[in-house]
Image (cartoon, grey):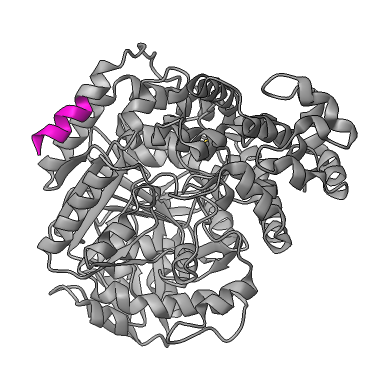
Amino acid sequence: MGSARDEILGRIRAVERPESPPAPRDYDRVRHADDPVALLAERIADYRATVYRAAARELPYRIAERLDGRGTIAAPADVPGEWRVPGVSWLTDDPPLGVSDLEEADGVLSGCAVAIAETGTIVLDAGRAQGRRVLTLVPDYHLCVVHADQIVVSVPEAIERLDPAGPLTFISGPSATSDIELDRVEGVHGPRTLEVLLAA
Amino acid sequence: MGRNPVTWLGSPTFPDAARRSLGDTQLRGNLRKATTTIRGKRESAVAELDDWEQLRRAGEAVKDDVLANLDTYLERLEAAVSERGGVVHWARDAEEANRIVLDLVRQEDADEVVKVKSMATAEIGLNEALADGGVDAIETDLAEVIVQLGEDRPSHILVPAIHRNRAEIKEIFAQMPDPPDSDDPRALAEAARKYLRRKFLSAKVAISGANFGVADTGSIVVVESEGNGRMCLTLPETLITVMGVEKVLPRWQDLEVFLQLLPRSSTAERMNPYTSIWSGVTPGDGPQKFHLVLLDNGRTSTLADEVGRQALRCIRCSACLNVCPVYERTGGQAYGSVYPGPIGAILAPQLAGDLHDEQAASLPYASSLCGACYEVCPVRINIPEVLTHLRAEVVEAKGKRTPEAMAMSAAAWVFGSRRRYEAAQKAGSLTRLLARGGNLSSLPWPGSKWTDTRDAPVVPKESFRTWWRRNRG
Ligand code: SF4
């Protein structure tokens, strides 16, 4: 197997290539927004996801409101206790849930690592209150809680905050396709309904 | 070493294929509608960022750095992926890559794999190779499902079934166990969801491509919309990713440039619905076996061409297809390659590496050199420059200018203008012009004055671009 590797690297090294200067980084690394929370809310809504806002104190109440009547909700093992509101039956990922359990669940509740206001994106890094990737993928409904201090304005700010070690998922609205006549249609394989609760 | 499957065996040359697709009014209608929509959207997505030009220059420079230090970054990527529990393989050509993947699939005792859309695996003809080895490759991207079930060829990088409208798609989906009951895109998407759900849940092995691979962290990036990518990258036990060697990025920070350039240029969104990034294997989360196949297949020889190598900066956004007047009129299949449009015209013949091949040699002529592709390209590939350069190489390889090449140059000039194009169609002369070895001196309409000009017909560039802007869409 060594030979393909050596041959490819050899072919590359045989080419005379000019030195390349360091890339110019004079684009905006940080961008200003008067109200990042409002910008995030507006941009997420543009993808036809639904955004709700909650004062930090009333968060459990707002979660209960969203989940009311939804039945079985999956959650990572480490979501804050106060998020486990009464009125739904909780399916906790400890021990790890099987895919068929998740297929049966009516939804999933998670937090996030970072949210990008300018693009309306939430990023999960499998860290606190987010769990394994499969949790937020298989159920058809995803409620994601975003705290004010997790919000940045630009993509570069988000990349700087994120740890490349964990598996990362950037989510911008519900699953969608533009494959039919380049028309955007929501809802293919990922959760078809995404709701975001901004606790700020 | 076999023939490079980047161009489809037995495809007619571009002029021949173009002549055929010009007769297909349904195709042209579907294409015009789709590209017109996306052009407008891209423009507003790009206009939103004041620093777009700076981002393009940064993207260009990072990719040039990649090409200048490709060996270093590939070794770094290999080390980072291995350190995090992945296994790295190297493939000189399509045949070798296909063999590696087939062996890996067999090791897992799988006779079915799920696939997330990947240009690299389409380029090497992986599905056909797997089928020959008794393995069913199930495409999961909606457009790829349409192409696969329709026993069709792709015609666009991003939207391979762009040539199909909703009514045609409904007909193709009629063979699903649970067919759609209307041609509403929602119903069509729902049918695909049901059809693929079982496949995702049962598959043991998934195969993906990669948009980027970060050398210093071993992170692999897949940018998608539907969630079929997330399914493939999360559910199966084994994941095999096939990545062209030029997709490597030096450092984590570089993603801040490309995750802005790519979505706005391709689907014209601020961000695509889903981007997955992983590094090697994460215990307890996602595939527990990860293989990365690094593919050359003509890339290192493209690197050796001083002018042509810039094609390797391409991030497959497809913006150049959507603005191309020739692409809009002929469709993607006329290019006879998984890479159609302006990027295909410069990349496919270089990867194929054989300018004595009639079909590959005809591709650099599939352009009117109007320059719209260069203007939109997020990594500033000077496509017209490479086209002109490759035309010179074709001429050199053949030792003479073929009548066909001349016919194509002239035809491309006609494609480039709606007025010229319509006039030519009316006169019925376009098909004659495109006829193999057509005799240019006998052209009946007033355009015949270019027949004695050089290789590329002289087009008043600036005024043409102004014209194209005003008249398109
Ligand atoms: S050549 Fe440029 S515009 Fe065309 S697909 Fe590649 S990156 Fe996009």
Residue B139 is left or right of residue B131, and the answer is right
Query: Can you tell which quarter of the image residue B133 is in?
Result: bottom left
Q: In this picture, is B57 found above or below A67?
A: above
Q: Residue at x 63, y 42 (%)?
A: B15
Q: Position of residue B289 (x, y in %)?
A: 14, 57
Q: Position of residue A140 (x, y in %)?
A: 40, 76
Res. B102 visible in picture: yes
Residue A129 is left or right of residue B237, and the answer is right
Say which quadrant the N terminus of chain B sits in: top left
Q: In this picture, is A119 found above or below A5?
A: below
B306 within the magenta span: no
Magenta span: chief secondary structure: helix
Q: In this picture, is A182 found above or below B466?
A: below
Q: Position of residue B351 (x, y in %)?
A: 40, 35
Res. B314 visible in picture: no
Query: Can you tell which quarter of the image residue B372 is in?
Result: top right
Nearest the eye: B419 or B166: B419
Q: Residue at x 65, y 48 (%)?
A: B18
Q: Residue at x 49, y 59 (%)?
A: B153
Residue B396 is left or right of residue B102, and the answer is right
Nearest the eye: B466 or A163: B466
- Magenta stretch, residue numbers: A1-9
- Number of callouts: 0
Q: Position of residue B460 (x, y in %)?
A: 80, 22
